[in-house]
Image (cartoon, helix red, strand yellow):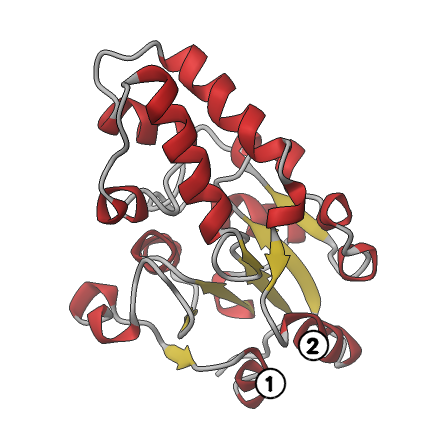
């Protein structure tokens, strides 16, 4: 394998445990705008999708601008419900200590990306680049977010690894020709589903397993 220079991470479900706050935000938004909640599996199927197209697909007929405001208002008023997965900080620190560039590539808007918003200031200081929803006109599974990161870092696809938790992360990586790691703690995409086009180059069961790859 060529020399890896940077490790890029998805945000939701990979670095940060946002599962409950995303589900709660959907329930809150649906109750306000539809009068009922969506099935849990339908909500989970939206993980990794930018908010607007997710709402448009699953809340037909709703005022999408209002729904977006309701969703974001709920989520941003509950930062205490967002946690870093156990072992992630130690892994990030070890990766950084080995000299790698660290980045976040996410479908989340910039305002919800900085880790210090959630009390993880030490972790926030480890990252060199964040590519958020606003930085791209196309989003995962399109390769645009990773290609944007590569351009900013002035690196080739074979010089980075992307770590994610969803089929959108894997497809984005494949289309950008970037090696991809699937995390085993994914709620939306268990490793046994990662077959065929959705196969990852590696699957890790815990954050420290990444250190055995790089």
User: Dot 2: what SS?
Assistant: helix
The residue pinned by badge 1 equals 211
User: What quarter of the picture does the C terminus occupy?
Assistant: bottom right
* Residue under pointer 2: 95
**Mark 2 and mark 1 residues within 8 Å of each other at the beta carbon:** yes
User: Mark 2, residues whose alpha carbon is within 10 Å: few (<14), some, or many (≥20)?
Assistant: many
Residue 12, disc:
none
Q: Along the polypeptide, which appears first: circle 2 or circle 1? A: 2
**Is residue 144 visible in the rendered structure shown here?**
no
- Residue at (38, 56) in percent of width and height: 169
Q: Is residue 201 visible?
A: yes
- Name the residue rendered at 50%, 33% in the picture: 136
Q: Nearer the viewer, residue 151 or 68?
A: 68
Q: Is residue 7 left or right of residue 176?
A: right
- For image coordinates 33% across by 51% down, the residue present is 168
- Residue at 37% over, 40% down: 49
In terms of depth relative to the viewer, which is nearer, 67 or 163?
A: 67
Q: Is residue 70 left or right of residue 81?
A: left
């Amino acid at each position: 394998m060529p020399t890896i220079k940077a490790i890029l991470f998805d945000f939701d479900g990979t670095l940060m445990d946002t599962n409950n706050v995303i589900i709660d935000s959907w329930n809150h938004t649906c109750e306000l705008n539809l009068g009922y909640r969506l099935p849990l599996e339908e909500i989970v199927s939206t993980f990794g999708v930018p908010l607007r197209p997710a709402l448009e697909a699953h809340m037909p007929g709703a005022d999408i601008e209002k729904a977006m405001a309701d969703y974001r208002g709920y989520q941003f008023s509950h930062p205490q419900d967002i946690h870093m997965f156990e072992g992630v900080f130690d892994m990030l620190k070890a990766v950084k200590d080995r000299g790698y560039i660290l980045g976040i590539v996410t479908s989340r808007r910039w305002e919800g990306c900085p880790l210090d918003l959630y009390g993880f200031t030490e972790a926030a200081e480890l990252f060199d680049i964040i590519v958020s929803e606003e930085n791209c006109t196309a989003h995962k599974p399109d390769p645009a977010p990773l290609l944007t990161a590569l351009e900013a870092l002035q690196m080739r696809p074979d010089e980075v690894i992307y770590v994610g938790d969803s089929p959108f992360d894997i497809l984005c990586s494949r289309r950008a020709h970037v090696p991809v790691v699937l995390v085993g703690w994914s709620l939306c995409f268990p490793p046994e589903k990662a077959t065929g086009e959705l196969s990852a180059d590696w699957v890790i069961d815990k954050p420290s397993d990444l250190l055995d790859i790089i």
